[in-house]
Image: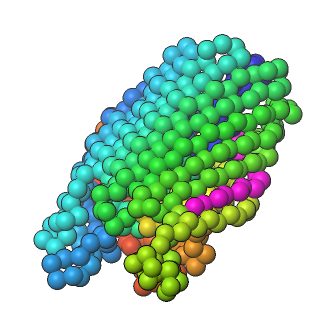
Amino acid sequence: MSRRVWLVLALGSVTAVWGQNVGGYTGPAVLSRAGAPLGKYLGQPITFRFHAGVQASYFTDLFAPATDEVGNLITGSGPGVVGTVGVYGARHGRHDTLAVDLLGAYRAYSRTDLRSYNGADVRLGLDYARQTSVRTAFELGINASSYSYSYGGLYQPVAPDPTEDLDGSAVEPFDTRTTRLSARAGVSHFLTQRWFFTVRGGGYTAQRHSKALLDSSGFSGGAALRYRLSANTTIGPAYQYSQFYFSANVGQSWIHDIQLALDHKFSPHWQIVLGAGAYYVRSERVTTVPLDPVIAAIIGRPTTLQPVTDKRTGPSIRATLSRAFRRGSLSFFVYQGVRPGNSFMATSETTNVGVRYSYTATSRVNFGLRANYYRANATMGRDVRYDNYGAGAAMSVRLARSLHFTAGVDYRTQDLRNSNYNRNRLRAFVGLVFSPGEIPVSLF
């Protein structure tokens, strides 16, 4: 196999271990981020493709961190209408690729008491990769989004990829405005025919409109060394360093993560990308503690501020097992590691396991399934645990050359241990999507 081809595989395998998308692309994904590299259809390049649609939806258990004029939590269920517009695809040059994923959506509810949930979601993904020489290639990526529907916006997967972005906190408990921005860059270089290394880094910020919720930001950087054992197998160590910062004096965290990574292709269709090792996390915050009565009487105040530190280690696992079909894809993922938590929880030990399946049965029909289980345990509060699990199914039928019928249902349960927070959400929809092309739109 040529060194040029292996450079492309090098970027792909290391990126997968460090937390990029999993799965395969089977048409413009109008409900979620596409699972495969941008601008691909079943592994083959596609050009830019426009899509626009409208849905009639029913939502249950909408929930915002706010109260009405009499102090009751603003919750509700009811029908709504969603309009979407976007473009997806890539420009492929001789030595480079520019890929774009842009989606906008507006959500409106008919009931007066739900109109506070009306709003727009927007998402932009840009990826650029270039091979500068036979030995060297680099990649750049930017993701930006603003949404007010939990789980990372209306079109975020119900089973989100465990490390889709650096912050990894797309599982939001509340339906409130959140704005995210992340950027990354990486370089891969072949030392010999078998040895190559990759260096990557990035940063993120997550800002929430409600002042009752946490904002966070951070950065991450690392390096990986790989050895090509055979045409189908690479192996080698990887190290990553991360820092997270939180608003409202909640604190910050420093994380060291080391893994042994394996990328193996069992057959032309089955592939596993696996990283296993350990992490060390140190978290600090400032807390209020009572003073001794004598000291309090002398200085005239009953409390003082005191720094608190927590240190712990644990298993670090990132794994994706994928199966590529001629007309679809199947992927399983497992993630265990440290993430910045969510809107009410800072740095957390996170577990995320799931499956996603998409199949284009004919030139007119696509259907998909997805499910996952997500758990987060706060590193600074051992009794704080958040669980989130659910599943979804959807289908699309091409009615005419550019017109598609879509339908689906999602169900999700959230639970916060030792609290009254226990939410169960159902979302069902039917709609029409206009998207020129011969490929039926993919919903997952």
In this rendering, the count of numbered labels is 0
Q: Judge whether 8 appears above or below 17 on screen.
A: above
Q: Magenta stretch: residue 280 in it?
A: yes
The residue range painted magenta reads 266-284
Q: Judge whether 155 appears above or below 211 on screen.
A: above
Q: Magenta stretch: residue 379 in it?
A: no
Q: Which percent across, then down, holds residue 191? A: 79, 21
* Residue drawn at the location 30% of the way across and 50% of the way down: 121
Q: Which percent across, then down, holds residue 47? A: 43, 27
Q: Which of 427/285 is in front?
A: 285
Magenta-drawn stretch, dominant element (helix, strand or loop): strand
The image quarter containing residue 402 is top left
Is residue 325 at least partly visible in the picture?
Answer: no
Q: Which of 79/336 is in front?
A: 336
Residue reaching furthest right? Answer: 229
- Name the quadrant of the N terminus: top right
Colouring: rainbow
Q: Which percent across, then down, holds residue 27? A: 45, 41
Is residue 98 at least partly visible in the picture?
Answer: yes
* Residue drawn at the location 82% of the way across and 20% of the way down: 192
Q: Which percent across, then down, holds residue 245? A: 50, 53
The image quarter containing residue 149 is bottom left
- Going by the image, does 22 lie left or right of 172? right
The image quarter containing residue 10 is top right
Q: Which of 324/196 is in front?
A: 196
* Residue drawn at the location 33% of the way across and 75% of the way down: 61
Q: Judge whether 293 appears above or below 404 on screen.
A: below
Q: Which of 357/78 is in front?
A: 78
* Residue drawn at the location 23% of the way across and 76% of the way down: 67
Residue reaching furthest front? Answer: 298
